[in-house]
Amino acid sequence: MVQLRARAAAAMTRRLSGLGLRLEGRQAETLAPSGAEIIEVPMTALDRRRVRRRLTAPGGMELLLAFPTGTYLAPGSVLDSINGITYVVAAAPEDVAAVVPRSMGEAARVAHAIGNLHRDFVEDGEAFLALWDAPIELLLTRLGVPFTRERRPFLGRPAWEHEGE
């Protein structure tokens, strides 16, 4: 009985490893088999940098991630194709500060100030986004710029990561 459960669990688990360091160019549309069902696996900015962990995809498939250190899973990256189903990374909604600067000068000042906190400040349509936390809220309040707290996909890097690229 225990062996049957172990085999069933192993059948629902896939180990993913050996992919290149940068996966940004791997898009589902180009690598997914024609006619394959695509399941999006929502991941936050931090999740897309975690390279060794267990992940349960929608539908219950368990994926064991074991990518080389430094791997970045961009939205659209194909994780795996199993039995005609392709698992693709999607940006999950997370708490962000949506800033709508009133001028280019204000946009530059806000971008500079957020950059000094070693945070990403990314464009998203008519607004700029930064991951929400107390220091960001305090900074934006002190600068007097219009902003709102929203739940949106964030395509920048997590707050703790600051590296030259």
Image: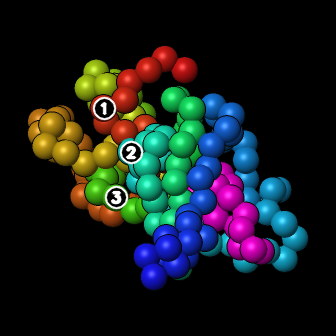
Q: What stretch is highlighted in magenta?
A: 77-90
Task: Please give left or right for residue 1 compared with residue 146 in the image.
Answer: right
In the rendered image, which quarter is residue 162 located in? top left
Identify the residue under disc 2.
Answer: 46
Q: Is residue 45 visible?
A: no
Report the residue that reaches farthest toward the top.
Answer: 164
Q: Which of 44 and 3 is in front in this view?
A: 3
Kindly identify the amino acid type of the residue bearing the numbered disc 2. Leu
Location of residue 39 with respect to 159 vertically, above or below: below
Location of residue 75 with respect to 123 vertically, above or below: below
| Alpha carbon distance from label 1 to label 2 | 9 Å
Q: Is residue 127 in the magenta section?
A: no
Verify CB contact (< 8 Å) between mark 1 and mark 2. yes
SS for callout 1: loop
Identify the residue under disc 3.
Answer: 94
| Alpha carbon distance from label 3 to label 2 | 10 Å
Identify the residue under disc 1.
Answer: 160
Q: Earlier in the sequence, mark 1 or mark 3?
A: 3
SS for callout 3: strand
SS for callout 2: loop
Q: Residue 55 carries which label?
A: none
Callout in the foreground (3, 2)? 2
Q: How crowded is mark 3: few (under 14 residues within 10 Å), some or many (20 or more)?
A: some
Instruction: Identify the residue at image location x=23%, y=43%.
Output: 145
Could you tell me what secondary structure mostly forms the magenta stretch? strand
In the rendered image, which quarter is residue 143 located in? top left
Kindly identify the amino acid type of the residue bearing the numbered disc 3. Glu
Q: Which of marks 3 and 2 is nearer the N terminus?
A: 2
Q: How crowded is mark 1: few (under 14 residues within 10 Å), some or many (20 or more)?
A: few
